[in-house]
Every structure is written in structure tokens, then in C-alpha cells.
Image: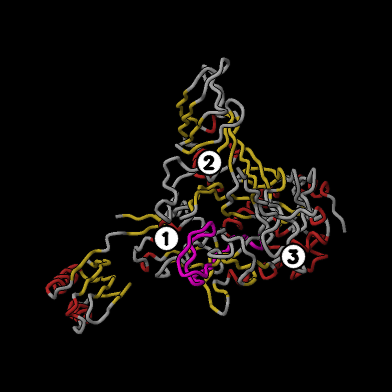
Amino acid sequence: MVVSKRIVLHFPKRMGDRPIIYRLIKDYDLEFNILKALITPEDEGLMVLALSGEQENYDKGIKYLTKNGVRIQSLSQDVIRNEERCTHCGACVTICPTDAFELDPLTRHINFYGEKCVACGVCIKACPPRAMEVHF
Amino acid sequence: MAKPIEEINEKIREGKAVVVTAEEIIDLVKQKGVKKAAQEVDVVTTGTFGPMCSSGAYLNIGHSKPRIKLGGGRTYLNDVPAYAGLAAVDIFIGANALPDDDPRNRVHPGEFNYGGGHVIEELVAGKDIRLVATAYGTDCYPRKKLETWINIKDLNEAVLFNPRNAYQNYNVAANTSDKIIYTYMGVLKPNLGNINYCSAGQLSPLLNDPYYKTIGIGTQIFLGGGIGFVAWQGTQHNPSGPRSENGVPKGGAGTLAVIGDLKQMKPRWLMGTSMLGYGCTITVGIGIPIPILSEEILKYTAVSDEDIFAPVVDYSGAYPQMKSGILGEVSYAQLKSGMITVQGKEVPTASLSSYPRAVEIASLLKEWILSGKFQLTKPVAPLPGVESGITFKPLKERPIED
């Protein structure tokens, strides 16, 4: 069964030069999408990944990461849009740091791409009709 | 060519009227020209759906047993204070009212999750509202406390009355400071990080009748999903600002005070709204039909986004400090492209007013007219025009000395 999860990885300082992500993908046959990466040499690194693959491989991949000192946090928040309240005004478009909202130039409707969302939560309070909701 | 409004209404009653929206008329005029379009088209419908702060509703809740005089006491609707300075059981709930214990901006930016605008939305949606009131008591109105659920269907009157709606154009907001700011024009990122605008542009009612030749006091309109009327000019109505060659104002100009029976309105078109760091308000849906009485009037309705300009105003400095000066002037076509250039920088843009909903309103109004259920009205009195000399004056502050 294929699982798809978004996780936050914290890399300790000493790991900067090891190809952890490469091994994770290659050895455990997982698909990945980097949502956010903050890697500074000599400092703790942060990466938000959307990882998917067969459940068994996914579990083995997570074990590999933890065995190598990577601290894992699941991105346990999910931001969804209440379609009843969204008025398609567009106030969210320029607020979102990952461009998860896009204006359709023809219909002038706003499309929300959940896959791009990193659940930062900024849109929740910036949306005037309060159409964006966080679910845990 | 002159087409009297009675002729148009006759055609509406016969189901023969030709009605198009203010968006459709643009291409129609491009194809057929003004003269032919003016002969063929009877009505152009306009629409807008955006936050309109100067809005509220007055209610008559009916007398209790024994009677209570709310006027002069304190009344709350779902913990939001209502104005109790009218007759015994008449109250007014304003869209920007906040619960007494709302923290506002004590921890900035405040969330403003619930206020008058939300109470109005819930009232229109048919929800029960908690009314809690205290009164000073009189011989004829002895009761001093009242705690009851109220519902719009039981009220004698529930009237939407908005002192300022449907702004004819408005500012475009930017932030040149190095800190994020929270305004009624939305969240503005530092150093020209983003720009917000708020207008339906080519669909906007007063932008399609720039000199108020057809829209006036008494004009019947689509308001909040039901029928309403223009009651008066709105507050800050300013017919005298600068206009482009085509007569369209280049910044905020005319406004409308509108009124209508809340009982026939719908929550889809009256939505409680929260502006982060600023306050609560209500998003109102308004649609106004323009009778094509002459070629000149038709010409005005064919205005398109590329012909409507607005000033880019610095909401981090000039605006709050009441200083003059703008950062530039842009057209709504440029704003809607998603990116404009200000002071040599490319800045992403976003709207606070919903264009798709404005399209929906103009289309709904078109359907109402085509179905014969909505006829056009001639204003009973005009809105003050350019000749009136009315302008938008600042406060003349006269400090009170000891």
C-alpha cells in the first residue's frame, strides 16, 4: 500500500556532508518532494519533505533516518479550505510563502494546491471570510 | 437616441428586454459600436462583492411582558454591543462592533474573530441570536433585565442600513516600511512585498455610471441577495476628485448609502469578515442595473479595466499620517495581471474584492430582470454631482482648552 506523508527532518550539525536524502530515496525506493530546506554548514539543518512509497519501504526509510541521527517530526497539521466560505477574493495569493494559492486568469477563481502547503498557518488569519482551517 | 425608462420597463414586463452585464457590454461595443449597442441594449447590470465597513442593521424586536426600554441601557447580541439609543425596542448593530472582552490589538495583530458583521450574517442565515439587555426602568417600561433568544423571522423589522457602500474606485495599498503591516486593505508585506486593491473595476456599479446619471436616491438594487434601494449618498461621497478623460474617477470618489429588508437577504451575500490586525466588518453584495437611456449612458457602461486607474498609496507612512503623495498610478488591467511595477520594482498584486462573485451578482440581476420580476426605477432625487461642489473634507481639529 502506498503511503504519502509530510515530515519535518532536523539534521544535527555534524551531518552536513553526508548524502542522507540520496540514500533514502535510492535504497528505499521512495518518491520525494522538498517543500522547504534550510541547510547551513556547521549548523542544524531543517528540511520539510513530502515522502511517498510502499508502506514497508517508507517504514524502513524512516528507521534509516533515525538510525543516522536525523530527528523526525510529522507535519501533523493539515490546512484545508472551507469551500462554503471561500469567496475567491484572492487576498491569500500574495500571502502564502509557498504559492499554494493560484489565481485562474480566465475564471478569476482561486485554486488551492494542498500539496504545496507547508501548514505555516499564515493564511488562516489573513483570509477575510476565514475560509482556511487547520486540522490536526 | 433617447429611450425613456418606461419603455424599458414595458419591454421587461413583456419579456422582451435585452439585458447584458457590464462585462458583456465591453465586447458587444467592440463588435457593434456604441450607436448600435445603445439601440439594441436596454439594461446593463453591474455588481460588486467586497468588504464594506460602514454597514449595519436596525431591528425592532417587539415588546416584552412587562415592557422594557432598551434605549439608554445596554444591549448585546451574541456578546456584541448593539446601539441602544433609539426607541424602546429598536436597536442598531454595526458591522465593526466588537465584544467588550475582545482583546483587539493588545497582542498585535489581533484576530478579530467575531463582531457585528458576523452577527448580521448569522441573523440573515436564520440562526438564533442571544440578546442580553439591561435597562434603567421607567413607570411605563418597568423591566430592567432581558435575556432571550431572538430570530429574524420573529422580528417586526430587520432592516439593513449601510451608510457607506459601493465605493466608486478606491486606493491601491502598499507598504514601503521594513515591517509587515496589518490594515483594512489586508496584510501588507514590507518593502513593497505585495500590493492589494479592492474594486470590481469594470463591473463596479458607480464606475459604470461615473457622473451618476442613472443611479440616484430611490434606485432599486440587488442588495445582500435581496432587493434594496439607494437611500442617500454614502458618507465621504466625493464627486469632485480627479477623473480620466473618459469621466471615470482616478481614485475613491462617490459612495452610496443603501437600505433593504434583511429578511429577504441571504448569508452568501452578507458575510461576516475579519481583517487581521484591523477589525471586523461585513462583505456586502450589491448589484445595480443601468437603464440605457442614451448613447452617452451606454458609452459609460463599456468602460473596461484598462481604462480605470487607481492611486498606489503607502499605507505604512503617507496614509496613516494623513500626508499627501502617491507611489504611482495603475490601471485595474495591470493590477489584475498579478504584477505591477512600482518605483522600479516588480510587485505581486492581490484583490480583496471578489471578482467572480461580482460576475455572479451581475448575472443574477440580469436573470431577475429578464424574468420580469425586477423592474428599473427612476431616482426620486439625484446624487450630488460635480456641480454640487461637495468634496471629502478632513477633520478641522479644534482642541478643547481648559
Question: Could you say where residue B167 lies in the image, as x and y percent from the top left?
Answer: 65, 55
Mark 3 crowdedness (10 Å alpha carbons): few <14, some 14-19, many ≥20? some
- Cβ–Cβ below 8 Å for labels 3 and 2? no
| Host chain of mark 1 | A
Is any atom of residue A107 visible in this view?
A: no
- Cβ–Cβ below 8 Å for labels 1 and 3? no
Q: Check if residue B113 falls in the magenta segment.
A: no
Q: CA–CA distance between discs 1 and 3?
A: 36 Å
Q: CA–CA distance between discs 3 and 2?
A: 36 Å
Residue B226 or residue B132, whichever sits in front: B132
Q: Residue at x 74, y 65 (%)?
A: B243
Q: Check if residue B190 falls in the magenta segment.
A: yes
Q: In this image, B238 relative to B63: left or right?
A: right
Residue B402 or residue B227, whichever sits in front: B402
Question: Could you say where residue B266 lies in the image, as x and y percent from the top left?
Answer: 56, 43
Locate residue A22: give its quadrant.
bottom left
Query: Which residue in the structure is indicated by mark 2?
Result: B120
Mark 1 crowdedness (10 Å alpha carbons): few <14, some 14-19, many ≥20? many
- Label 2, secondary structure: give it: helix
Query: Which residue in the structure is indicated by mark 1?
Result: A123
